[in-house]
Amino acid sequence: NWLGLGARNRSALRSAAAGGFQCPPAARGAGEQVLTPSSAPSRALAGTPLPLAAMGPGPSRAPRAPRLMLCALALMVAAGGCVVSAFNLDTRFLVVKEAGNPGSLFGYSVALHRQTERQQRYLLLAGAPRELAVPDGYTNRTGAVYLCPLTAHKDDCERMNITVKNDPGHHIIEDMWLGVTVASQGPAGRVLVCAHRYTQVLWSGSEDQRRMVGKCYVRGNDLELDSSDDWQTYHNEMCNSNTDYLETGMCQLGTSGGFTQNTVYFGAPGAYNWKGNSYMIQRKEWDLSEYSYKDPEDQGNLYIGYTMQVGSFILHPKNITIVTGAPRHRHMGAVFLLSQEAGGDLRRRQVLEGSQVGAYFGSAIALADLNNDGWQDLLVGAPYYFERKEEVGGAIYVFMNQAGTSFPAHPSLLLHGPSGSAFGLSVASIGDINQDGFQDIAVGAPFEGLGKVYIYHSSSKGLLRQPQQVIHGEKLGLPGLATFGYSLSGQMDVDENFYPDLLVGSLSDHIVLLRARPVINIVHKTLVPRPAVLDPALCTATSCVQVELCFAYNQSAGNPNYRRNITLAYTLEADRDRRPPRLRFAGSESAVFHGFFSMPEMRCQKLELLLMDNLRDKLRPIIISMNYSLPLRMPDRPRLGLRSLDAYPILNQAQALENHTEVQFQKECGPDNKCESNLQMRAAFVSEQQQKLSRWLWAAGRVNRPRVGRGLINWQGGGGASWQGEPRDRALAGTGGMVRNGAFSSRCD
């Protein structure tokens, strides 16, 4: 606890093997041939426009290198439907910042900030709570906060100017962990910085008594001190250093904290023998009110205030609700939901409890309206949750808001990470990164390999169970990076492409900005064969079936003016599940065709197909499938800098990237070409004179054993009826029967 309260300061956990999604290699089908357009393939790979694809002049005319490139592209396109581990957070064009002094824990806390005073710019804020002190001859370490511009340089961060003079007789700033909490009030807002180990010194005669009360600082939008701003000059000293640890003398204010538009709030988990407390200062015009949680608890060491979020539309549409984590409540952790009361009290409205001892339930929390019902839902991290038999390590509990009345006692969804990953150590609402109209969530697993960040999307039913993207720290190619995902900050579009971005911190003195790529929606795609019912007798030498495919797109709810030229790569395949196929594309012996579409305007293309020779199966339909992708030339390794991502859009992974249609063979089964058997049989015992025999006579033995039995089978359903897909006369051939006027009779002696 002395080094920063519990689990967040553990330097290592058992790491899990790095997982990931893998795509199976795409194999070329029997007789498959890659047909290429005559234009240069390198333009398609670079994402620049290509003319509409057409049947190529043949492999012999293409240079060798482009042919190999197009073959690789064709195989990539043919692998449609494969699960991939990336959606629209880019991992190739990064903004990375590193600490000047290793071991400073630069990146322990992070925040995105927009500066509008004095200059217009976006900044990455990073707390470094173990940073060396500004030299004063007395202090070694104080911690610091750095502001970093969006550049390609790793080492151009500036230290935020927070002047705190050392005065051991009154307060101790040595190792006060300045930067343990960093928060931005949003666009044009202020900045909050806390040092939860700031210590006041009291004297009783010649004996000093130290009170680790913590301290928080508010600075202006330009990160400087403005003495005319009451937000910045207010003391924010919520804990009474004249009391001991049984009250607020060791409250460690600032372990958590943040802003709303008219409040600033702080968590103080060390108050009242580490029972903990939550504090809030609210400003309404000229009035200022202080609030704190005063309800008695029957024990200490709960850590109320370890994490804290404040907002409206939680338990009331207008009044704010305080949500605070207590990860040691009854050894299983809990989340307290508090509301404002007259007189400055915060009253407990509901307590959500964890389900496993030691899981640290409540050590990370996030609020987001996951299902767009207008109410904030709650996500709670439990990074040390485990299930030994299933190799599970870490969890996120998802509680859906019940229209502002309360939250259910049990989560509607429980997400798990791999063993030893500390999945859920950080969780953040990151805005709608793919602009589908629903809020998205990031979850950190900093001890899974070099660290991972899981991205989850939501829908009208709530959070989706499977992550849409997993960002691997080891794949970013950054030497020295570890514990990637320890801290997270989102909900701000720093490159102004209408998609919010994500800042990720670590304990290894690195922070990484991941920006969102534009998402392309294919709003119109058709695949139409003509004719839909094929009569082989009508085929010509140049055409038997004609297929028309069309595409059109727009950008997904992001920038409405985005109309860049893009090139879609597509693959058409006839009879994919049959070998040999029954159709081939005109001009080749292949049932596979690869082509390109240049857009944005809607484009269509018609292709001719021919029947293969020696066709035998004319009963089952021919399935024609089409899949498409957006091939772009991306760097093999990550590059640093704020390069525009408009040239690197990505297809909406929520849309089906494959279409199917079918061509039926003509079977002479009516206008719908569907054959349905209507076979009926009637049988009777008859004499040689064709007289019906009575069953009673037969049973009584009055007639000797009959010599003849005749069965009559009547066919009903018209001349097109068939049995097992065969014409009527063929179905009856070889049975030894006779067909007369639609009736079949057989004789047995």
Image (cartoon, rainbow, N blue to C red):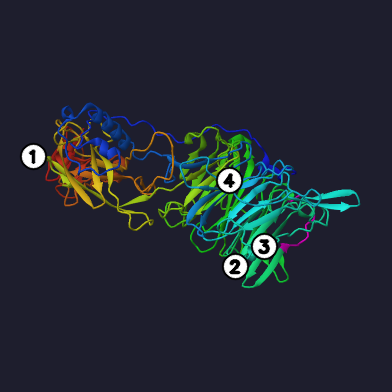
Residue ID for mark 4:
487
Q: Determine crowd level at label 2: few under 14, some 14-19, many 20+ residues with C-alpha closer than 10 A.
A: some
Residues at discs 2 and 4 in contact (Cβ within 8 Å): no
Left/right placement of residue 483 relative to residue 335 reads left
Determine whether, in the image, residue 559 is placed left or right of residue 739.
right
**Residue assigned mark 3:** 233
Which numbered tag is attached to residue 540? 1
Amino acid type at image mark 2: His
Camera-side residue of 573 and 487: 487
Q: In this view, does 660 lie to the left or right of 430?
A: left
Residue range highlighted in magenta: 292-302
Measured in 3D between alpha carbons, the distance from the residue under mark 3 to the one under mark 4, in whole angstroms, is: 29 Å
Q: Quickly name the residue at label 2.
A: 316
**Dominant SS in magenta:** loop
What residue do we see at 41% from left, 55% from top? 498
Mark 3 or 4, nearer chain start: 3
